[in-house]
Image (cartoon, helix red, strand yellow):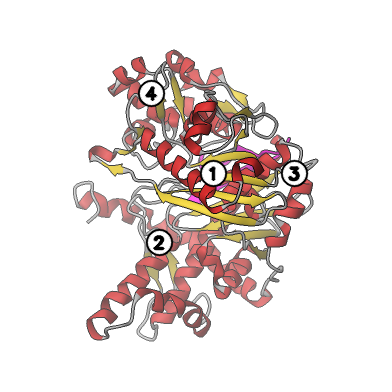
Amino acid sequence: MKDILIGIDAGTSVIKSVAFSLAGEQLAVSSTANHYQILTSGAVEQDLQQTWLSTLDTLKGLVDQINDLPDRLAAIAITGQGDGTWLIDKEGKAVCPAWLWLDSRAGSLVEKYCQSTKDIRRYEITGTGFNACQQGAQLLFMKQHHAALLQQSETAFHCKDWLYFQLTGIRATDPSEACFTFGDFRTRRYSDEVVTLLGLEDERSLLPPIVDGANDSHELSASAAKLAGLLQGTPIVLGYVDIICTALGAGLYDPVEDTGCTIVGSTGVHIGLARGASDVKLNAKRTGYTMVMPVSGYYAGLQTNMASTLNIDWLIDVVADVVGEYSAGIDRNTLIARMDDWIGSASPANILYQPFISEAGERGPFIDSNARAGFIGLSARHRFPDLVRSVVEGLAFASRDCYSAMGELPTQVCLTGGAARSKELRSIFGSVLGAVIKTSDRKEAGAAGAAMMAAVNIGLYESMDSCVDSWVRPYLGEAEPIDQSLQCTYQNAFLNYVNARSAVAPVWKSMVDDKGGEHA
């Protein structure tokens, strides 16, 4: 009996293969580290062959864990890290290490391009702000500085596309990545006008055909089957990019409710659901992203702030450093466990915190590489719990700032990520956003979202709506109502947050200029 689905989630640092029952129950996980190199001049690279071999190891790990897996396996679906450029030649061999989404070599090129009228039109078509991490920017940089790489190349993949090729022998990408970088989100196809606007007409042949895993699949090849210990002919589904699959698995897609999804991770990711191309809201600053969903007519609008829980990590590490000088045995995890107590003991909106702790500044919903974190309103009466609460409030304000750039605030937000376990954090986010909060208990939402696509693709479910009923709703916690008194308090505090980040921007720039173009 074919009673198991596998979702592969190939992340930047970790690759996971996750086995699910047909009803969405997580059965087993096999994972391994995925290493990358940080080089000079902003280069961040990953080895293609090692990424494939590591993925094979995770599949073989599931074979070892589950009895008769090859015979029971109904399908495999793949998702993975987005952006970046994975070049291969005619024989299917890597031309060079993959350029990852962390790579910043194209940064100055992007800054210059964004000042042109070409970018205005490019944004209108793609619905996506231009960043150095994107394949379009990286190909343009290669064209100007590493032309030999492109001359040797036959196909430009993203991470999951490379793994799909290894499993099936098919060169393809999915609609979310294709439209995000080179396409028209309205048609879900490549846009030759966008390619021309980027000056990449000669590189158009590198773009692989679009295969929509919502409807199409290919078979596991004989060679890949032998390597993985699975059966040749097993259906392989090319999932959408990891951020879309994660949102799908965590509860973004709801055909009835006006739902958003926030991933409270190292980076803050805020995703709104649009029920048609006409509902997609593009902003004047040309920030954020538009991605197609694996449901006909639906889209995801995204804004990301560079640092979310990184701010909490920084504050906890500061106190851990101090405590460590005086008290052995108190570690970082002990301090994190006390976070809810600290937040609960502090008054709301007492201090205003700007959560721009990332060395890269900010990119959503405004772009400023000079942006830095800071507390406003400190006095001698404030203590550590006040700082903790203000940091979490700052993260919630950043979330609202991002959602506001995409249009009206959602009435319901699904939270996912480790920090979502904090009851106080959930209360603050709900009050700031004016939204009912639900928390996803799904441990591997990205792999689950990919497997959901496979479940619909092979006909286990009539539609994504019925799949969501089994795979998502049972894993969502009870709706947590808005604290009305906190909502009123945070309404004014949010206006102060927006005004403060606008007012202090010249100071950020002056600090950089005073130090010769670099932050201390």
What number is the disc on residue 8?
1
Q: CA distance from mark 3 to mark 4?
A: 36 Å
Above or below 197: residue 231: below
Quadrant of the snapshot with the C terminus: bottom left
Q: Quadrant of the N terminus?
A: top right
Q: Which mark is residue 115?
A: none
In the structure shown, which secondary structural element does the residue marked by tag 4 occupy? loop
Please state the total of marks drawn on the protein image.
Answer: 4
356 and 52: which is toward the camera: 52
Amino acid of disc 4: Lys
Point 45% across, 21% down: residue: 155
Q: Residue 465: x percent and y percent?
A: 77, 46
Q: Nearer the viewer, mark 2 or mark 4?
A: 4
Give the CA separation, mark 1 to mark 2. 26 Å
Q: Residue type at mark 3? A: Met
* Residue in front for this viewpoint, 23 or 37: 23
Label for residue 310? Answer: 2
Calculate the distance from the C-alpha at mark 1 to the C-alpha at mark 4. 22 Å
Q: Amino acid at mark 2?
A: Leu
Residue denoted by label 3: 464
Mark earlier in primary sequence (3, 4): 4
| Residue name at image x 32 percent, y 21 percent | 149
Using a 10 Å C-alpha cutoff, classify the residue at mark 1 as few (fewer than 14 neighbours), some (14 to 19) or many (20 or more): many
Can residue 382 be seen here? The reply is yes
* Residue type highlighted by circle 1: Ile
Dot 3 or dot 2: first in sequence order is 2
Q: Which residues are magenta?
A: 281-305
Mark 1 or 3: the one toward you:
1
445 over 377 or under it: above or below: above
Mark 2 falls on what kind of element?
Answer: helix
Q: Residues within 10 Å of mark 4 (few under 14, many from 20)?
A: few
Q: Residues within 10 Å of mark 3 (few under 14, many from 20)?
A: many
